[in-house]
Amino acid sequence: MNAAVATGFELANPLWLLLLLALPPLVVGHHRRPPADALTYSGLPVAGLPRSAWRWAAIRLHLAFYCRLVALALAIFALARPQDVDRWIDETTDAADLFIALDVSGSMAAEDFQPKNRLHVAKEVVQDFIARRPGDRIGALIFADTAVTRSPLTLDHKALSALIDTVELDSLPDGTSIGVALATAALRLEAGDRPDSSTETDGTSETDGNAETEARVVVLVTDGANNGGEIDPLTAATLCSELGIRVYTVGVGTDERVPVPRFFINPRTGQRQVERRMAKLEVDDELLQAIARRTGGRFFQATDRDALEQVFDEIDGLETRAVVVRRHRQARELFPPFVLAALVLVLVPLAPAAVGWSFPP
């Protein structure tokens, strides 16, 4: 499609134009110079030449001055920073509708992922992933024994990242309801059809609703086995498949014993304390693989931070479809041509000297 282009001219620093007031006095001063200072013997034509030669000598006399004068004017105008504003450009980009389902059950507190725990590292990796996909609408939910949507599909990735940053452990009843999380994400994706246009809150981009339907993807991050919820995970996976939603499952952690903090209230002091116990937290690999297969996605295993980052690097290359994104360039700088023209004008008086002409100082 063709984008409507609204352009406007604007000066970012117009006060620099006040320096132009100094140009008329320079012109007056130049023409009031005494003839003896203005015309030297080397600048005059040889006696007996026609009047046109004298006229050319006068032109050469003033040419250098006016070239420098115009160069100064252009330099001042460049300092005022002329800009082209409100320019809309249509760009074709790959995009998808993504929903991230993040496990916040108690086992995500396991401290085998440094520098803090599994949830802390998962949040940071997810935020980096979001930052790398500017063309996508992305939503997020958290789940434990139930699922809660943190953000619907949005192009406002800064706000989404801030919401993910506030996710904490123990914010939901403990448990792992993978089926509920998948069903909730699928319904959010199904309800999130693109309107005719959607614009970022900072006004920098807009997506055309006439573009081809985007890929729809759920990225499920969990470290446990399904042990709650009223929806069977494979039933939810079938729902995703019927809706054309691809699910990428990410199993976080190892089968080894890991330190898991447990918070409690000391009955004697009434203060909150923590104790760490070694526990074996097994990921249900078979279930996560079955979910991925049923929806045409993939299963990934991440045993540490580096592995989790590599997983999201792979997911970053998932299938997408082209959409048209309208980008708003609020200020395109126009001063470079004026600077170049000023430099050329400064050099113009030197050109005749290169072929044997001389100019007055």
Image (cartoon, helix red, strand yellow):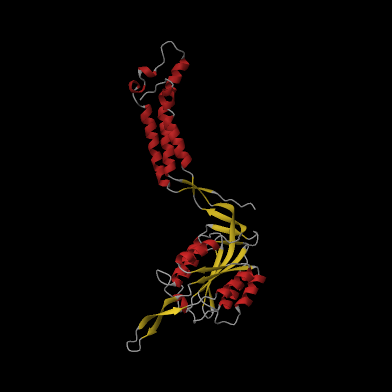
Q: Is residue 189 left or right of residue 79?
A: right
Q: Is residue 158 visible?
A: no
Q: Residue 249: x and y, percent? A: 56, 70
Judged from this view, the residue extending furthest toward the front is: 256
Percent position of residue 52, x then y: 47, 17
Q: Residue 51, how many percent across, how many down?
A: 46, 15
- Is residue 29 shown above or below 263? above
x and y percent of residue 206 in the render?
57, 58
Of residues 20 and 165, the one nearer the viewer is: 165
Please give the name of the residue rendered at 40% of the width and 81% of the height, measured from the top-left corner: 263
Numbered circles on residues, count: 0
Residue 289, above or below 20: below
Residue drawn 37% across and 33% down? Answer: 26
Q: Residue at x 56, y 52 (%)?
A: 88
307 or 338: nearer the eye?
307
Q: Residue at x 42, y 30 (%)?
A: 347
Q: Quadrant of the C terminus?
A: top left
Is residue 84 placed above or below 223 in the rendered structure? Answer: above
| Quarter of the view holding residue 288 | bottom right
Furthest-top residue in view? 48
Furthest residue toward bottom: 268
Q: Is 84 on the left-hand or right-hand side of 293?
A: left
Q: Is residue 41 visible?
A: yes
Query: Residue 291 occupies which quadrant of the picture?
Result: bottom right
Pick the front one: 213 or 304: 304
